[in-house]
Image (cartoon, rainbow, N blue to C red):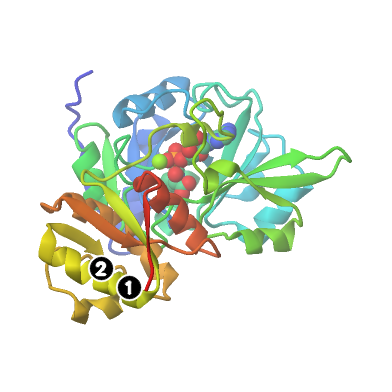
Amino acid sequence: MAFDINTKILTVTDGQSLSAAATLAADVIRHGGLAVFPTETVYGLGADGTNAEAAQKIYAAKGRPSDNPLIIHIYDPKDAEPYSVTCSLYYALAEAFMPGPLTVIMPKKDTVPYSTTGGLDTVAVRCPSHPVAREIIKQAGVPVAAPSANLSGKPSPTAARHCIDDLAGRVDVIIDGGECDIGLESTIVKIDVDDGGEDYLTLLRPGAVTCDALRCVCPRVDIARAVSEQLAQDEKPLSPGMKYKHYAPRAPLVLLDGDGESILAFLQKRQSECRCAILCYDEEIPHLENKRLLPVGPRDDMKTQAHLLFSNLRLADSTDAEIIYAHLPPHTGLGLALYNRMIRAAAHTVLRLEK
Ligand code: TXA
Ligand code: MG
């Protein structure tokens, strides 16, 4: 397929430009086209989720396998009604976390074509909080199917520049709304029913809505094995997205585990031995040579580390590094979301360093 669309790029700077950009993007979506827009997590590549042909265009533009389902984005939690079979647990989650970075998987209704759900009988629903995304969805008047706006195999885009690099010529419009606040994709949970008829959750992808926060609403939250472990070759994941090769940088990424002193000594030695890029804590900068350093924020600031991860991985790819080092994040709180993305980017390569 030829990708020679004359992509319009609009920047949102104030209320007026927001309204004009949203009108154009909504118009493109209503007419079966593709619009890239910012959300609070990452940029999304949106189309009309009720239009099978428009959903097909998303897969073509991203180069994504068409059995990997899309999330539909709605304006208000109750807008899920025409498209999914909701329940009281859905509304309890909506009350606690919507609009915001949570996606809920429920049985789909016939209004959603199988090309949107990758052939599944369930549909993923999310109500984003970003003002640009909200205005586009509101004006479009349809649920907006949107995966992350990157080429398949690249890191999710957290700034318009990343979307332009990946998708210019492949989409009708790109709305530049600045950097995404969170920088990691939404938390995904599936609602299931246990043997006693009680609803419970399975976490399929960790994000800014943490397990502890989910457990305040629903006491049983199971964690899908693929979230933190490597599945066997023949094991079927609960979310199709987990089976595809995830983004890995050009140079191998190695995650370092151990005490701060041992890690710093190792990094200093490696800087003198090879061309390494280092995703380092701000506190480490004065102790390292200023060569291919990609600061991730303060050691204890998970929010900043999440915000910068994907752009740092893109930057690492633009250096001449032969190897990339980063710290192994903790498995707790927002750390689990970082861990989930980084362990896959590193193909589960962890180096343990001890005194
Ligand atoms: O933050 C986000 O969720 C962003 C923004 C744009 O909203 N979107 C996003 O979409 O990350 P995407 O397509 O890149 O990731 C969605 C993941 C995929 O791994 C897909 O397999 C899974 O959600 N998914 C979607 N529908 C599903 C379903 N019905 N059952 C299981 N997994 C599903
Ligand atoms: Mg994605």
Residue 134 coordinates in the image, percent (x, y): 47, 52
Label 1, label 2: how far apart the Cα atoms are: 6 Å
Disc 1 target residue: 262
Q: Is residue 229 left or right of residue 277?
A: right
**Residue occupying the point 58% across, 60% down:** 210
Q: Is residue 283 left or right of residue 301?
A: left
Three-letter code, disc 1? Ser
Q: Are marks 1 and 2 in contact (CB under 8 Å)?
A: yes
Asked whether the viewer can see residue 142, the reply is no
**Residue occupying the point 37% across, 43% down:** 347
Q: Is residue 11 left or right of residue 104?
A: left
Q: Secondary structure at mark 2?
A: helix
Residue 3, above or below 82: above
Give 35 or 179, whichever is nearer the viewer: 179
Answer yes or no: disc 2 within 8 Å of ligand 2.
Answer: no
Three-letter code, disc 2? Phe
- Which label sits on residue 116? none
Disc 2 target residue: 266
